[in-house]
Image (spheres, rainbow, N blue to C red):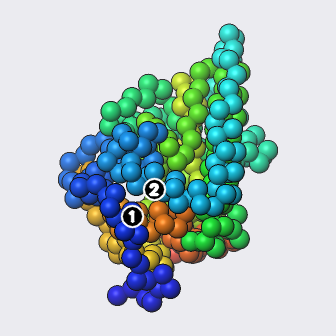
Amino acid sequence: MPKPNPYRPFEPDPDQVAQQPAISGNDINGLGEHQPRNPSMVYWAPNPMDIPHGPLQLYFYEQSAKEPAFGERRAARQHILDAPLPEVSNVSTSKTPVDWTVGLERFVADGICEMTGVAEMQPEWVFKGYDIPQSRVIILGVQHDYAEISTAPQVRAGLEVMTQYARAALAAKTVAGWIREQGWAAEAVTGPMTGALAMIPPALACGFGELGKHGSIINPELGASFRLSAVLTDAPFEPTPAREHGIDAFCQNCRICEDACPPEALSPDKQMVRGTRKWYVDFDKCLPFFNQTHGCAICIAQCPWSRPGVGPNLAAKLARKKERAAVE
């Protein structure tokens, strides 16, 4: 049984319940399916009315509109999204794939983002009904201010999420602009409405970390406390490798996010989703609380990996444990 939780019992707003579609979000996500398939968009659609849960997405907007600061930060992000990208230069820069990828380090050094990685585009990362023709996906990560995100599910945490989504958008457009100025087409992809691309799979593939029990990526340095954006291009970047740190096994034995989740949407065991056994968040349980608390974020704030300075020590401890096991 989960530990006592100050946000339980949770009763969804009847107005929200009235807008729930007949189909389960878990069914749309492919929970229980043993055959691989492309993901179907369940939430954060560019046009909410294109999906069954669109009315609930609009409900989320209505709730956040009650706090003027959300409107201000949404407008700030929209200003970034509306800014034009530079034209693609007529002269294409020639570099080795390694040099292309090393060039991304400047954006971390300049504070544009905290992480970069590159993956070769895979068709299974594209939402059903969409197409991505580019061969490379560059993933960018921006870190939350822990003092702000740790207040989840209060308004401050929701505002911090919006702040970092704006940073992520600026990072994607900055990197896309840099590539275009070197003569290669590039398209920025920003959250939470990412359109065609499911961003967690390429982020895992390019070394951002491992999938946690709470359904978010856990990175040894940043924990689960960061947001993603991406750039799609055919510029010949060298892919960066996936990394394992023992986080998956750690999650198997940790129940902190399970106990912290008010609607009990997190499972102690992995589940089959579109042909892959993995950690999965019960969409139908999570969404009502998420919608009524400006995006919740309790699980990523409470994750022990997210606390400043804790992640690297945990990773080092797990690495030593793995080394000992290898010589026994």
Between 69 and 24, the one lying in front of the other is 69
Count neighbours of disc 1 (C-alpha within 10 A) and say few if under 14, some if 14 to 19, many if 20 or more: few
Which residue shows up at 34% across the image and 87% down it?
1
Q: Quadrant of the C terminus?
A: bottom left
Please say whether residue 279 is visible from this viewpoint.
no
Residue at which label 2 appears: 59
Residue at which label 1 appears: 15
Residue 200 position, x and y percent, is 47, 50
Q: Is label 1 or label 2 in front?
A: 1
Q: Secondary structure at mark 1?
A: helix
- Taking 153 as reference, is 215 above or below it? above
Residue 255 position, x and y percent, is 44, 80
Q: For the view shown, which residue lies furthest in the top direction?
A: 90
Q: CA distance from mark 1 to mark 2?
A: 9 Å
Q: Quadrant of residue 180?
A: top right
Q: Amino acid at mark 1?
A: Asp
Q: Quadrant of residue 159?
A: bottom right
| In this picture, residue 33 sits left or right of residue 289 | left
Label drawn at residue 171 = none
Between 275 and 280, the one lying in front of the other is 280
Label located before the other in sequence (1 or 2) = 1
Residue 201 position, x and y percent, is 44, 47
The reply to whether discs 1 and 2 touch (Cβ–Cβ < 8 Å) is yes
Q: Amino acid at mark 2?
A: Tyr
Which residue shows up at 34% across the image and 44% down it?
51
